[in-house]
Image (cartoon, grey):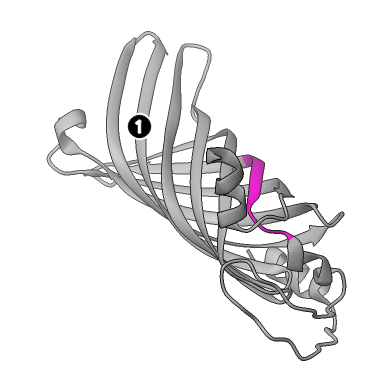
Amino acid sequence: MKFLIGLVIFLLGLPVMAQSKGSFFGQVVDVTFGDDAQSKNFGVGFNMALGYPQVTITRTSGEESFYSGISILGKAFFPFYNTSSASIDGTIVGKYIDLSNNANNSTQKEFSNQIGGGLGLHFRLFRLFLGAEYYMMAGRHYWVGDISDTLEYRYNLFEYYVGFHINLTKALRVAFSYDIGTGNIPKSKTLLSSDSQYGEQIIWLHLIYGTGQTPSQFFSKIFK
């Protein structure tokens, strides 16, 4: 996390800020701040990301299981407020996580899949961004080896994240982010005395495309 913060500060550099005038619902203004002047016409955006997840599940007894794997995310951004220097977006997001237990061996293996979708808010200040999202998730575990079994459950996940982006063109940017998510696996599914705690940390690499359209322009083209 310290490395990520240091890298963000380095990439932000020393800003040269100009006076700006913001407006709502995608109307933008002229601002000069490095390559972030390109952000003023970014509009409704779509994000595809690949991530490296680390997941911990803590049971009632305090016993912990650790998992790692790969994750995929898709997200749509709908700007409520947008200027060259800052924006506030509503997000619709879906993600899939494929995991294996770090304690797997030749005689016993455990694998898990997590999939779900949610809504959130995304805040950008120049190249730095942060946000929070609320997911409805479905989880599945299956064991292979001396013990073979499956477990399926549903849970709610709250997640927050921080990151930074670099504009490649007026319509395309690459971004890196770090997120932390927490939830509870219901005891009715695990048959334990209380809920198990689910925690995840994911490092993401994003590719984001901006349509250059305000939400009203975007939806008018879809539903015309």
The quarter of the picture where residue 161 lies is bottom right
The answer to whether residue 101 is left or right of residue 149 is right
Callout count: 1
The quarter of the picture where residue 81 lies is bottom right
Identify the residue at horizontal 82%, vertical 73% (top origin): 10
Disc 1 crowd rating (10 Å Cα; few below 14, some 14-19, many 20+) is some
Residue at the disc numbered 1: 138
- Against 98, residue 76 (above or below) is below
- The verdict on residue 50 being magenta is yes
Identify the residue at horizontal 49%, vertical 47% (top origin): 92
Q: Is residue 151 visible?
A: yes
Identify the residue at horizontal 59%, vertical 35% (top origin): 72
Q: Is residue 2 visible?
A: no
Identify the residue at horizontal 81%, vertical 88% (top origin): 17
Between 138 and 55, the one lying in front of the other is 138
Between 68 and 173, the one lying in front of the other is 173
Q: Position of residue 127 (x, y in %)?
A: 73, 69
Q: Label 1: state its secondary structure.
A: strand
Residue most extreme to the front: 224
- Picture quarter with the C terminus: top right
* Secondary structure, magenta segment, majority class: strand
The answer to whether residue 144 is left or right of residue 106 is left
The quarter of the picture where residue 116 lies is top left
In the rendered structure, which amino acid carries the disc numbered 1? Ala
Q: Position of residue 174 (x, y in %)?
A: 77, 52
- Picture quarter with the N terminus: bottom right
Between 28 and 132, the one lying in front of the other is 28
- Against 130, residue 9 (above or below) is below
Q: Position of residue 142 (x, y in %)?
A: 38, 18
Boundaries of the magenta span:
42-51
